[in-house]
Image (spheres, helix red, strand yellow):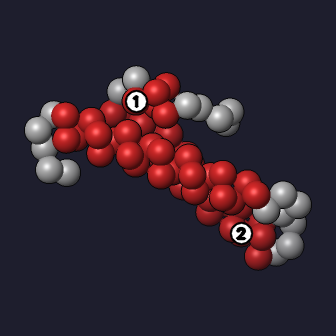
Amino acid sequence: MSKQKFSELAALSEADLKAQLKTAKEELFNLRFQLAIRQLENTAKIGDTKHRIAQIQTALRTKALAAGGTK
């Protein structure tokens, strides 16, 4: 997945954000697995994926607060 700016993430719907979050978490799992079996060449991908997960979670939280929900 290409890098997205936070403003692009914030413009997505909640369903799209949840789908991207699920994909990013699966990618992080796979990267950690590759790291464990010494097949991961670029370890910076783990940090990038964690950063993307945090951005998606922030966008989801922002939408929830804007809607008046607590979660």
Give coordinates of residue 50: x percent, y percent: 58, 56
Residue sitting at x 45%, y 43%: 56
Q: Residue at x 82, y 75 (%)?
A: 37
Disc nearer the start of the sequence (2/1): 1
Q: Say few, some or many: other residues with alpha carbon within 10 Å of mark 1 (under 14 / 14 to 19 / 20 or more).
A: some
**Where does the image place residue 69, in percent across and percent down from the top left?**
13, 43
Vertical order, 30 against 35 (above or below) = above
The reply, left or right, for residue 2 in relation to residue 23 is right
Disc 2 to disc 1, C-alpha distance? 30 Å
Q: Secondary structure at mark 1?
A: helix
Q: Is residue 60 above or below residue 16?
A: below
- Residue at image mark 2: 33
Question: Which residue lies at the image location 68% right of the left edge and 33% below the top edge?
Answer: 2
Within 10 angstroms of label 2, few (less than 14), some, or many (20 or more) residues?
A: few
Q: Please state if 24 lies on the left or on the right of 34 as rendered.
A: left
Residue 25: image tag: none
Quarter of the figure with residue 1: top right
Q: Position of residue 38 (x, y in %)?
A: 86, 73
Q: Looking at the image, which residue is at 22% across and 40% down?
A: 64
| Picture coordinates of residue 29, whole percent (x, y) | 62, 63
Q: Tell which of 66 and 25 is nearer to you.
A: 66
Identified by mark 1, the residue type is Ala
The amino acid marked with disc number 2 is Phe
The residue beneath circle 1 is 10
Q: Are marks 2 and 1 in contact (CB under 8 Å)?
A: no
Q: Quadrant of residue 18?
A: top left
